[in-house]
């Protein structure tokens, strides 16, 4: 098993190319037999959920 650790930057969370690139990378990681650990210490921008809304 492989674990990928991603530390989000403001560029990843803002709408535009950075967010699109991060989503593509996240899809590629999750399509393999691997884990993704996302570290998000930013309070700006919309959450990037994988499974839908948080209750």
Image (cartoon, rainbow, N blue to C red):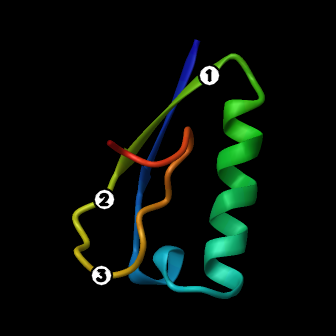
Secondary element under disc 3, as helix, strand or loop, is: loop
Look at 40% across and 82% down and name the residue there: 10
Mark 3 neighbour class, 10 Å CA radius: few under 14, some 14 to 19, many 20 or more: few
Tell me whether the residue at label 3 lies in contact with that at label 1, contact meaning CB atoms closer than 8 angstroms. no
- Where does label 1 land, which residue? 34
Residue extending furthest front?
Answer: 55
Q: What whole-number distance in Å separates the C-alpha atoms at marks 3 and 1?
A: 28 Å
Look at 73% across and 44% down and name the residue there: 27
- Where does label 3 land, which residue? 44
**Horizontal side of residue 14 vs 30, given as left or right:** left
Tell me whether the residue at label 3 lies in contact with that at label 2, contact meaning CB atoms closer than 8 angstroms. no
Secondary element under disc 1, as helix, strand or loop, is: strand
Mark 1 or 2, which is nearer the eye?
Answer: 2
Q: Is residue 13 above or below residue 52?
A: below
Instruction: Tell me, for residue 47, which label it has, or none.
Output: none
Q: Quadrant of the C terminus?
A: top left
Look at 67% across and 59% down and name the residue there: 23
**Horizontal side of residue 42 vs 19, given as left or right:** left
Instruction: Tell me, for residue 40, which label it has, or none.
Output: 2
Tell me whether the residue at label 1 lies in contact with that at label 2, contact meaning CB atoms closer than 8 angstroms. no
Identify the mark nearer the N-term, 1 or 2: 1
Q: What whole-number distance in Å separates the C-alpha atoms at marks 1 and 2?
A: 19 Å
Q: Name the image quarter holding residue 51.
A: top right
What percent of the width, then of the height, locates residue 50? 56, 44
What percent of the width, then of the height, locates residue 1? 58, 11
Near-viewer residue (22 or 1): 22
Q: Is residue 47 above or below residue 31?
A: below
Secondary element under disc 2, as helix, strand or loop, is: loop
What percent of the width, then of the height, locates residue 6? 45, 51
Near-viewer residue (11 or 53): 53
């Amino acid at each position: 098993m492989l674990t990928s650790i991603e530390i989000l930057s403001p560029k990843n969370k803002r709408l535009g190319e950075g967010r699109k690139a991060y989503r593509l990378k996240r899809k590629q990681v999750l399509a393999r037999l691997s884990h993704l650990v996302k570290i998000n210490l930013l309070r700006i921008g919309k959450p990037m959920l994988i499974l839908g809304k948080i209750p």
